[in-house]
């Protein structure tokens, strides 16, 4: 699975770099907008990406963020934390948001992160009753103990704590003399045959009659799902097992547990371990270790003041030393060594030495680079900010980014980039709810040096209504009003006003395995001293589930525009995507053809698992247009070796074989 997801993303990004829509906009829907705060209920998030009034044909990356709850792919088995990247299909990207175990509201955003003019949409959802007040808990698990060790190998990913073990998460405290925490599945198991295992709200000592009628609970063995606070605690003294769920740890009727539910994990086969004074787990994102020491067997090989171990999708780059040093016969030595200092639970400072960092899908930076980065989360989940200085000692550059929410319905973002301390780029966005819709304002100010340079700026304000559903025809309608101003490097000022109407219909189902989704839009734009334009678009996507774990998607988009100053050719775009998922064989194919431009984009990928550690892969990318054509075809053989991956790549175009060791970061 690891191999498939990494190359799947790289393939999509290659197409994206060549054919991503520019000036795209994004809408976000949340259904339902309120669910119980039970840690189980889910909300479906649907992001729609358009270029003008047309749904984008080529896949683009949508980044979902939430201030509370847990995101996961639609139909996915488990969560991915509070950030999730999804590629669009037919102009739409979907995700699932699972509820918290405490009543609160969450601001959910969907952003186009790989676009030159990035845009964001937002929705506020509620976990609990309609009168729910804002409750904020840091989504971090704090772990301490007399002895703390983490086993990062992919087959384990377990943290072991001995002696005065303490775990704190969202106001719930677990104490024991010995416990194991599975950071991949967020399962905690604690044991103490002297009855000193406890779970309750806040730190002990607790005022309790120890009858386990309500939290806190005491016993000899505990098993707990950290995501839902569903668990059970067994007491030898009473011979009873108490079951509970939710952040309130409310008692529930007894259910039958597996015979090994309270068994600790087997970590005897671990080869690599990280020992530390304290650990902070950011679920499905990373683990921070204070004063970590790296051991290979019983031999200490490295000590650091702080260290971050990746989790979730980031862990595919390899744990332990795999993220520090790698090698490729094509790119040479690859280094990404961060030194952390002055740390907090919600802030980091790092100086990183790197070589061969990616600068695009296929390219890498040459030479060595040192950069500094500071990251901080704002209090009460109100946002975060980053400050970075790169290429220190040479042509240094500066980047500042800030995301912040104001209340439950307003969100803003700001970025300032000064690459090689020459050209200056800035972008600001504001999103809020006004009446029966949302208002978005986006502006940028750039200052370019050298011949032909100068100052350019752009400002756009758009109000878009919430979709209005007409049940009689199973359709939704939305209206948008916009105005904008731009000042170009050629000293030309343009004022624009626009109005648009969009329509989409519920999916027409053809049996249980086929569906058709239509969409249409009409837009009028007036540009002062620039003429008027009326545009119509129609898009439809057909999806079919085939035999042998295969799915097929077909898309068609038609655009027609009438401009008062020049003729706009009609646009016809056809798309195809095919996927196959079997036990050992996975395949993917995508193609997009523009009839007017005679431009074709296509990619094909196959991945075959030979055994648990061995596999083969073939992939090809093809681009063709009036400007020329490009193709890249490679055959891979790979082997998983602990947290690392060894690869042999044969490139057909270059006629060369490349050898790589975990070439991920």
Image (spheres, grey):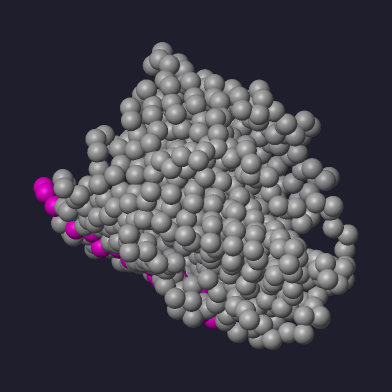
Left or right: 152, with 307 as reference point: right
Which residue lies at the image location 49% right of the left edge and 51% below the top edge? 275
* Closest to the observer, 190 or 342: 190
Find out whether residue 448 is within the magenta segment. Answer: yes
Numbered label tally: 0
Which residue lies at the image location 77% right of the left edge and 80% below the top edge? 210
- Identity of the residue furthest to the top in this view: 655
- Identity of the residue furthest to the left in this view: 451
Q: Position of residue 517 (x, y in %)?
A: 68, 50
Q: Main secondary structure of the magenta part?
A: strand
Q: Position of residue 30 (x, y in %)?
A: 63, 66
Which residue lies at the image location 35% right of the left edge and 42% below the top edge? 336
Q: Looking at the rendering, which quadrant does residue 652 occupy?
A: top left
Find out whether residue 310 is within the magenta segment. Answer: no
Query: Vertical placement of 414 versus 544: above or below?
Result: below
For the question of whether residue 489 can be seen, the reply is no
Q: Position of residue 300 (x, y in %)?
A: 43, 42
Left or right: 23, with 490 as reference point: right
Q: Quadrant of the C terminus?
A: top left
Which range is magenta?
429-451
Q: Position of residue 120 (x, y in %)?
A: 46, 62
* Closest to the observer, 135 or 181: 181
Left or right: 613, with 625 as reference point: right
Q: Quadrant of the N terminus?
A: top right
Which residue lies at the image location 59% right of the left edge and 58% below the top edge? 161
- Identity of the residue furthest to the front in this view: 194
């Amino acid at each position: 699975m690891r191999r498939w997801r990494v190359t799947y993303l790289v393939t999509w990004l290659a197409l994206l770099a060549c054919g991503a829509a520019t000036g795209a906009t994004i809408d976000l829907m949340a259904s339902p907008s309120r669910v119980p705060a039970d840690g189980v209920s889910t909300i479906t998030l649907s992001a729609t990406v358009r270029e003008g009034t047309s749904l984008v044909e080529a896949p683009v990356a949508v980044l979902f963020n939430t201030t509370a709850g847990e995101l996961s792919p639609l139909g996915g088995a488990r969560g991915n934390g509070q950030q999730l990247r999804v590629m669009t299909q037919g102009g739409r990207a979907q995700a699932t948001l699972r509820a918290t175990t405490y009543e609160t509201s969450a601001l959910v955003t969907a952003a186009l992160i790989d676009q030159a003019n990035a845009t964001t949409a937002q929705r506020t959802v509620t976990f609990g009753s309609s009168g729910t007040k804002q409750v904020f808990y840091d989504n971090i698990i704090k772990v301490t103990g007399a002895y703390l060790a983490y086993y990062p190998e992919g087959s384990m990913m377990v943290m072991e704590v001995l002696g005065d073990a303490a775990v704190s998460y969202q106001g719930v405290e677990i104490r024991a003399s010995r416990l194991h925490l599975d950071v991949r599945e967020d399962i905690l198991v604690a044991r103490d045959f002297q009855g000193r295992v406890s779970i309750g709200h806040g730190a002990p000592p607790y005022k309790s009659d120890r009858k386990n009628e309500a939290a806190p609970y005491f016993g000899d063995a505990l098993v707990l799902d950290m995501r839902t606070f569903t668990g059970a605690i067994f007491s030898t003294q009473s011979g009873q097992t108490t079951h509970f769920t939710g952040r309130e740890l409310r008692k529930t009727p007894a259910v039958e547990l597996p015979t090994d539910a309270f068994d600790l994990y087997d970590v005897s086969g671990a080869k690599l371990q990280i020992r530390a004074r304290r650990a902070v787990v950011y679920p499905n994102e990373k683990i921070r270790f204070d004063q970590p020491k790296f051991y290979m067997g019983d031999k200490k090989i490295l000590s650091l003041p702080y260290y971050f171990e990746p989790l979730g999708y980031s862990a595919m780059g390899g744990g332990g030393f795999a993220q520090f040093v790698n090698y490729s016969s094509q790119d040479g030595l690859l280094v990404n060594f961060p030194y952390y200092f002055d740390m907090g639970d919600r802030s980091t400072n790092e100086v990183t030495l790197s070589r061969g960092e990616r600068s695009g899908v296929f390219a890498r930076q040459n030479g060595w680079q040192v950069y500094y980065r500071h990251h901080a989360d704002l209090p009460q989940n109100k946002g975060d900010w980053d400050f970075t200085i790169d290429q220190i000692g040479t042509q240094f550059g500066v980047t500042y980014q800030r995301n912040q929410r104001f209340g439950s319905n307003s969100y803003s973002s700001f970025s300032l980039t000064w690459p090689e301390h020459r050209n200056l780029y800035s972008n600001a966005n504001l999103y809020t709810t006004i009446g029966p819709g949302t208002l978005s304002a986006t502006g940028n100010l750039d200052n370019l040096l050298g011949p032909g340079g100068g100052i350019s700026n752009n400002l756009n304000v758009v109000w878009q209504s919430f979709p209005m559903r007409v049940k009689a025809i199973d359709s939704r309608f939305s209206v948008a009003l916009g105005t904008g101003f731009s000042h170009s490097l050629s000293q030309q000022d343009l004022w624009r006003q626009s109005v648009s109407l969009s329509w989409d219909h519920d999916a027409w189902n053809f049996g249980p395995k086929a569906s058709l989704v239509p969409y249409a839009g009409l837009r009028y734009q007036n540009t002062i001293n620039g003429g008027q334009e009326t545009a119509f678009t129609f898009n439809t996507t057909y999806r079919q589930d085939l035999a042998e774990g295969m799915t097929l998607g077909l898309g068609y988009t038609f655009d027609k525009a009438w401009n008062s100053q020049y003729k706009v050719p009609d646009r016809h775009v056809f798309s195809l995507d095919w996927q196959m998922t079997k036990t050992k064989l996975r395949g993917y194919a995508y193609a997009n053809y523009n009839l007017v431009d005679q431009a074709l984009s296509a990619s094909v990928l196959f991945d075959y698992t030979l055994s648990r550690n061995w596999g083969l892969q073939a992939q090809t990318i093809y681009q063709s247009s009036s400007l020329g054509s490009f193709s890249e075809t490679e055959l891979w053989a790979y082997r998983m070796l602990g947290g690392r991956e060894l690869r042999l790549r044969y490139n057909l175009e270059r006629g060369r074989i490349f050898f790589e060791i975990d070439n991920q970061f």
